[in-house]
């Protein structure tokens, strides 16, 4: 079935695009949600009148993605992960971890748009990732994976437990003296 999209639909197209889709997909998903309208003379004429408005929106999206690309490529991000003494991570840096790091830095990017060179990063070092922005625009970000000192954390936990054990013993005689 031939339809014209009313809105941007992920993995299908953008507003104003004419697409051939399965009849069931159009009937059960696109048309009831008003994401698309059937392709006919009336709807074609309607979208011809809106063509300038749609192009203006697409142009603003292109400009936004270009500025986002510049901001992303200007930064170097740091990801702190627990690692052993040899630099091997106890976990792995995945697209989810990169997306969280970007979100903390103020960039709201879906993890599906992030592409790491391999499946996951399992060692400390400097790496690159590509982010698919709008249309064919791609940003390349650089990030450092830094080891979090796990042994010192274990030592501080032991010290805290020791201090906690000593503290009640010191306060107990003072309370009984009153």
Image (cartoon, rainbow, N blue to C red):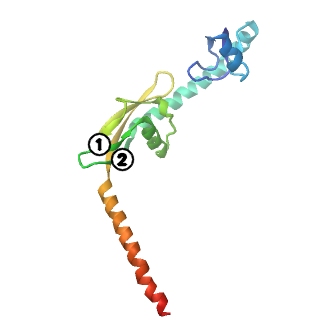
- The structure residue drawn at horizontal position 34% and vertical position 59%, both measured from the top left corner, is 153
Mark 1 and mark 2 residues within 8 Å of each other at the beta carbon:
yes
Residue 162, image x, y percentages: 36, 71
* Residue 75 location, quadrant: top left
Q: Please give left or right for residue 57 compared with residue 76 in the image.
A: right
Residue 19, image x, y percentages: 62, 11
Answer few, some or many: residues within 10 Å of disc 2's Cα (few below 14, many 20 plus, some between 14 and 19). Answer: many
Residue 123, image x, y percentages: 29, 40
Q: Which of marks 1 and 2 is nearer the N terminus?
A: 2
In the rendered image of this protein, does residue 29 appear above or below residue 22? below
Which numbered circle lies on residue 73?
none
Q: Which residue lies furthest to the left in this view?
A: 86
Q: Is mark 2 on a helix, strand or loop?
A: strand
In the rendered image of this protein, does residue 3 appear above or below residue 62? above
Q: Residue furthest top?
A: 41
- The structure residue drawn at horizontal position 32% and vertical position 38%, both measured from the top left corner, is 122
Q: Please give left or right for residue 46 compared with residue 163 in the image.
A: right
Q: Which residue lies furthest to the bottom in this view?
A: 178
How far apart in space, not on screen, are marks 1 and 2 (Cα)?
8 Å
Answer few, some or many: residues within 10 Å of disc 1's Cα (few below 14, many 20 plus, some between 14 and 19). Answer: many
- Residue with the mark numbered 1: 124
- The structure residue drawn at horizontal position 43% and vertical position 26%, both measured from the top left corner, is 138
Front residue of 128/66: it is: 128
* Residue 127 location, quadrant: top left
Q: What element carries label 1?
A: loop
- Residue with the mark numbered 2: 81
Front residue of 158/32: it is: 158
Residue 130, image x, y percentages: 40, 30
Please state, as top left, top right, bottom left or bottom right, where the N terminus lies in the image. Answer: top right
Q: Please give left or right for residue 169 compared with residue 28 in the image.
A: left
């Amino acid at each position: 079935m031939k339809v014209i999209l009313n809105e941007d639909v992920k993995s299908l197209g953008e507003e104003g695009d004419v697409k051939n889709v399965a009849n069931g997909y159009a009937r059960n998903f696109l048309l009831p949600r008003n994401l698309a309208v059937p392709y006919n003379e009336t709807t074609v004429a309607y979208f011809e009148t809106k063509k300038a408005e749609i192009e203006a929106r697409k142009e603003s999206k292109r400009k936004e993605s270009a500025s986002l690309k510049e901001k992303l490529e200007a930064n170097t991000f740091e990801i702190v992960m627990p690692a052993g003494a040899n630099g091997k991570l106890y976990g792995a840096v995945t697209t989810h971890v990169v997306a969280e790091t970007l979100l903390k830095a103020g960039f709201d990017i879906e993890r599906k748009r992030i592409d790491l060179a391999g499946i996951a990063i399992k060692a400390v070092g400097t790496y690159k990732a590509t982010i698919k922005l709008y249309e064919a625009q791609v940003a390349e970000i650089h990030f450092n994976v830094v080891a979090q000192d796990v042994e010192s954390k274990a030592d501080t936990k032991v010290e805290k437990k020791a201090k906690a054990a000593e503290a009640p013993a010191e306060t107990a005689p003072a309370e009984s003296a009153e």
